[in-house]
Image (cartoon, rainbow, N blue to C red):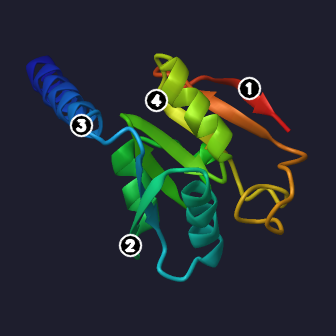
Amino acid sequence: MNAIKVGGAAILMICIGLFVAKINEGDATEVVMHKSPNCDCCSEWGAHLKENGFTVVEKTHDNMDEIKRTLGMPEKLASCHTGVIGGYLIEGHVPAADVQRLLNEKPDIIGLTAPGMPMQSPGMQKKGQEPKGYDVLALDKDGSTYVFSHY
């Protein structure tokens, strides 16, 4: 019985390693955004990134919960869309400045998240307004978080 558990754990670790290697192949300015086909605020966040020099590839899915699970985003930190850039996950309405800071600093984390749908975040607010009233969290590999930026 224990050999089966150990074997299963080894297979899981290999799969995770292959997944991490795959997302690390990404272009440093291209964000692949996974979103529901009916979510306009996701597209607005994509427009915010484009305005700030990123290329955005939108991929629509009817099963976003499964996509998030596959990518490794914990449910409690989820938002409406999940981006992948430079080997990092970007969950929700994270400002472009934070994405750029992440890529410049290259911390040893899974990615950034703005859990929920903060009303005064890029994609949720009127164009030109500054982000306000929420935190962008860094997600560590052990599942813990810390404040990356406060707005």
Circle 1 Cα neighbour tier, 10 Å, few/some/many (<14 / 14–19 / ≥20): few
User: Extreme bottom residue here?
Assistant: 38
Mark 4: amino acid:
Ile
Q: Label 3 to label 2, Cα distance in Å? A: 22 Å
Q: Tell me the residue that label 1 is attached to.
A: 147
Q: Tell me the residue that label 3 is attached to.
A: 25
Q: Tell me the residue that label 2 is attached to.
A: 61
The first of marks 1 and 4 along the sequence is 4
* SS type, badge 1: strand
Q: Label 2 to label 1, Cα distance in Å? A: 29 Å
* SS type, badge 2: loop
Looking at the image, which residue is at 67% across and 33% down? 137
Mark 3: amino acid:
Glu
Q: Label 4 to label 3, Cα distance in Å? A: 15 Å
Quadrant of the image containing the C terminus: top right
Answer yes or no: is residue 80 visible. Answer: no
Q: Nearer the viewer, mark 3 or mark 1?
A: 3
The one of 126 and 2 positioned closer to us in this rendering: 126
Residue 137 placement, left or right of 124: left
Residue 41 placement, left or right of 88: right
Give the percent coordinates (x, y) of residue 87. Answer: 36, 34
The first of marks 3 and 2 along the sequence is 3
Q: Tell me the residue that label 4 is attached to.
A: 110
Examine the rendered structure and indicate whether residue 37 appears above or below residue 65: below
Examine the rendered structure and indicate whether residue 26 appears above or below residue 14: below
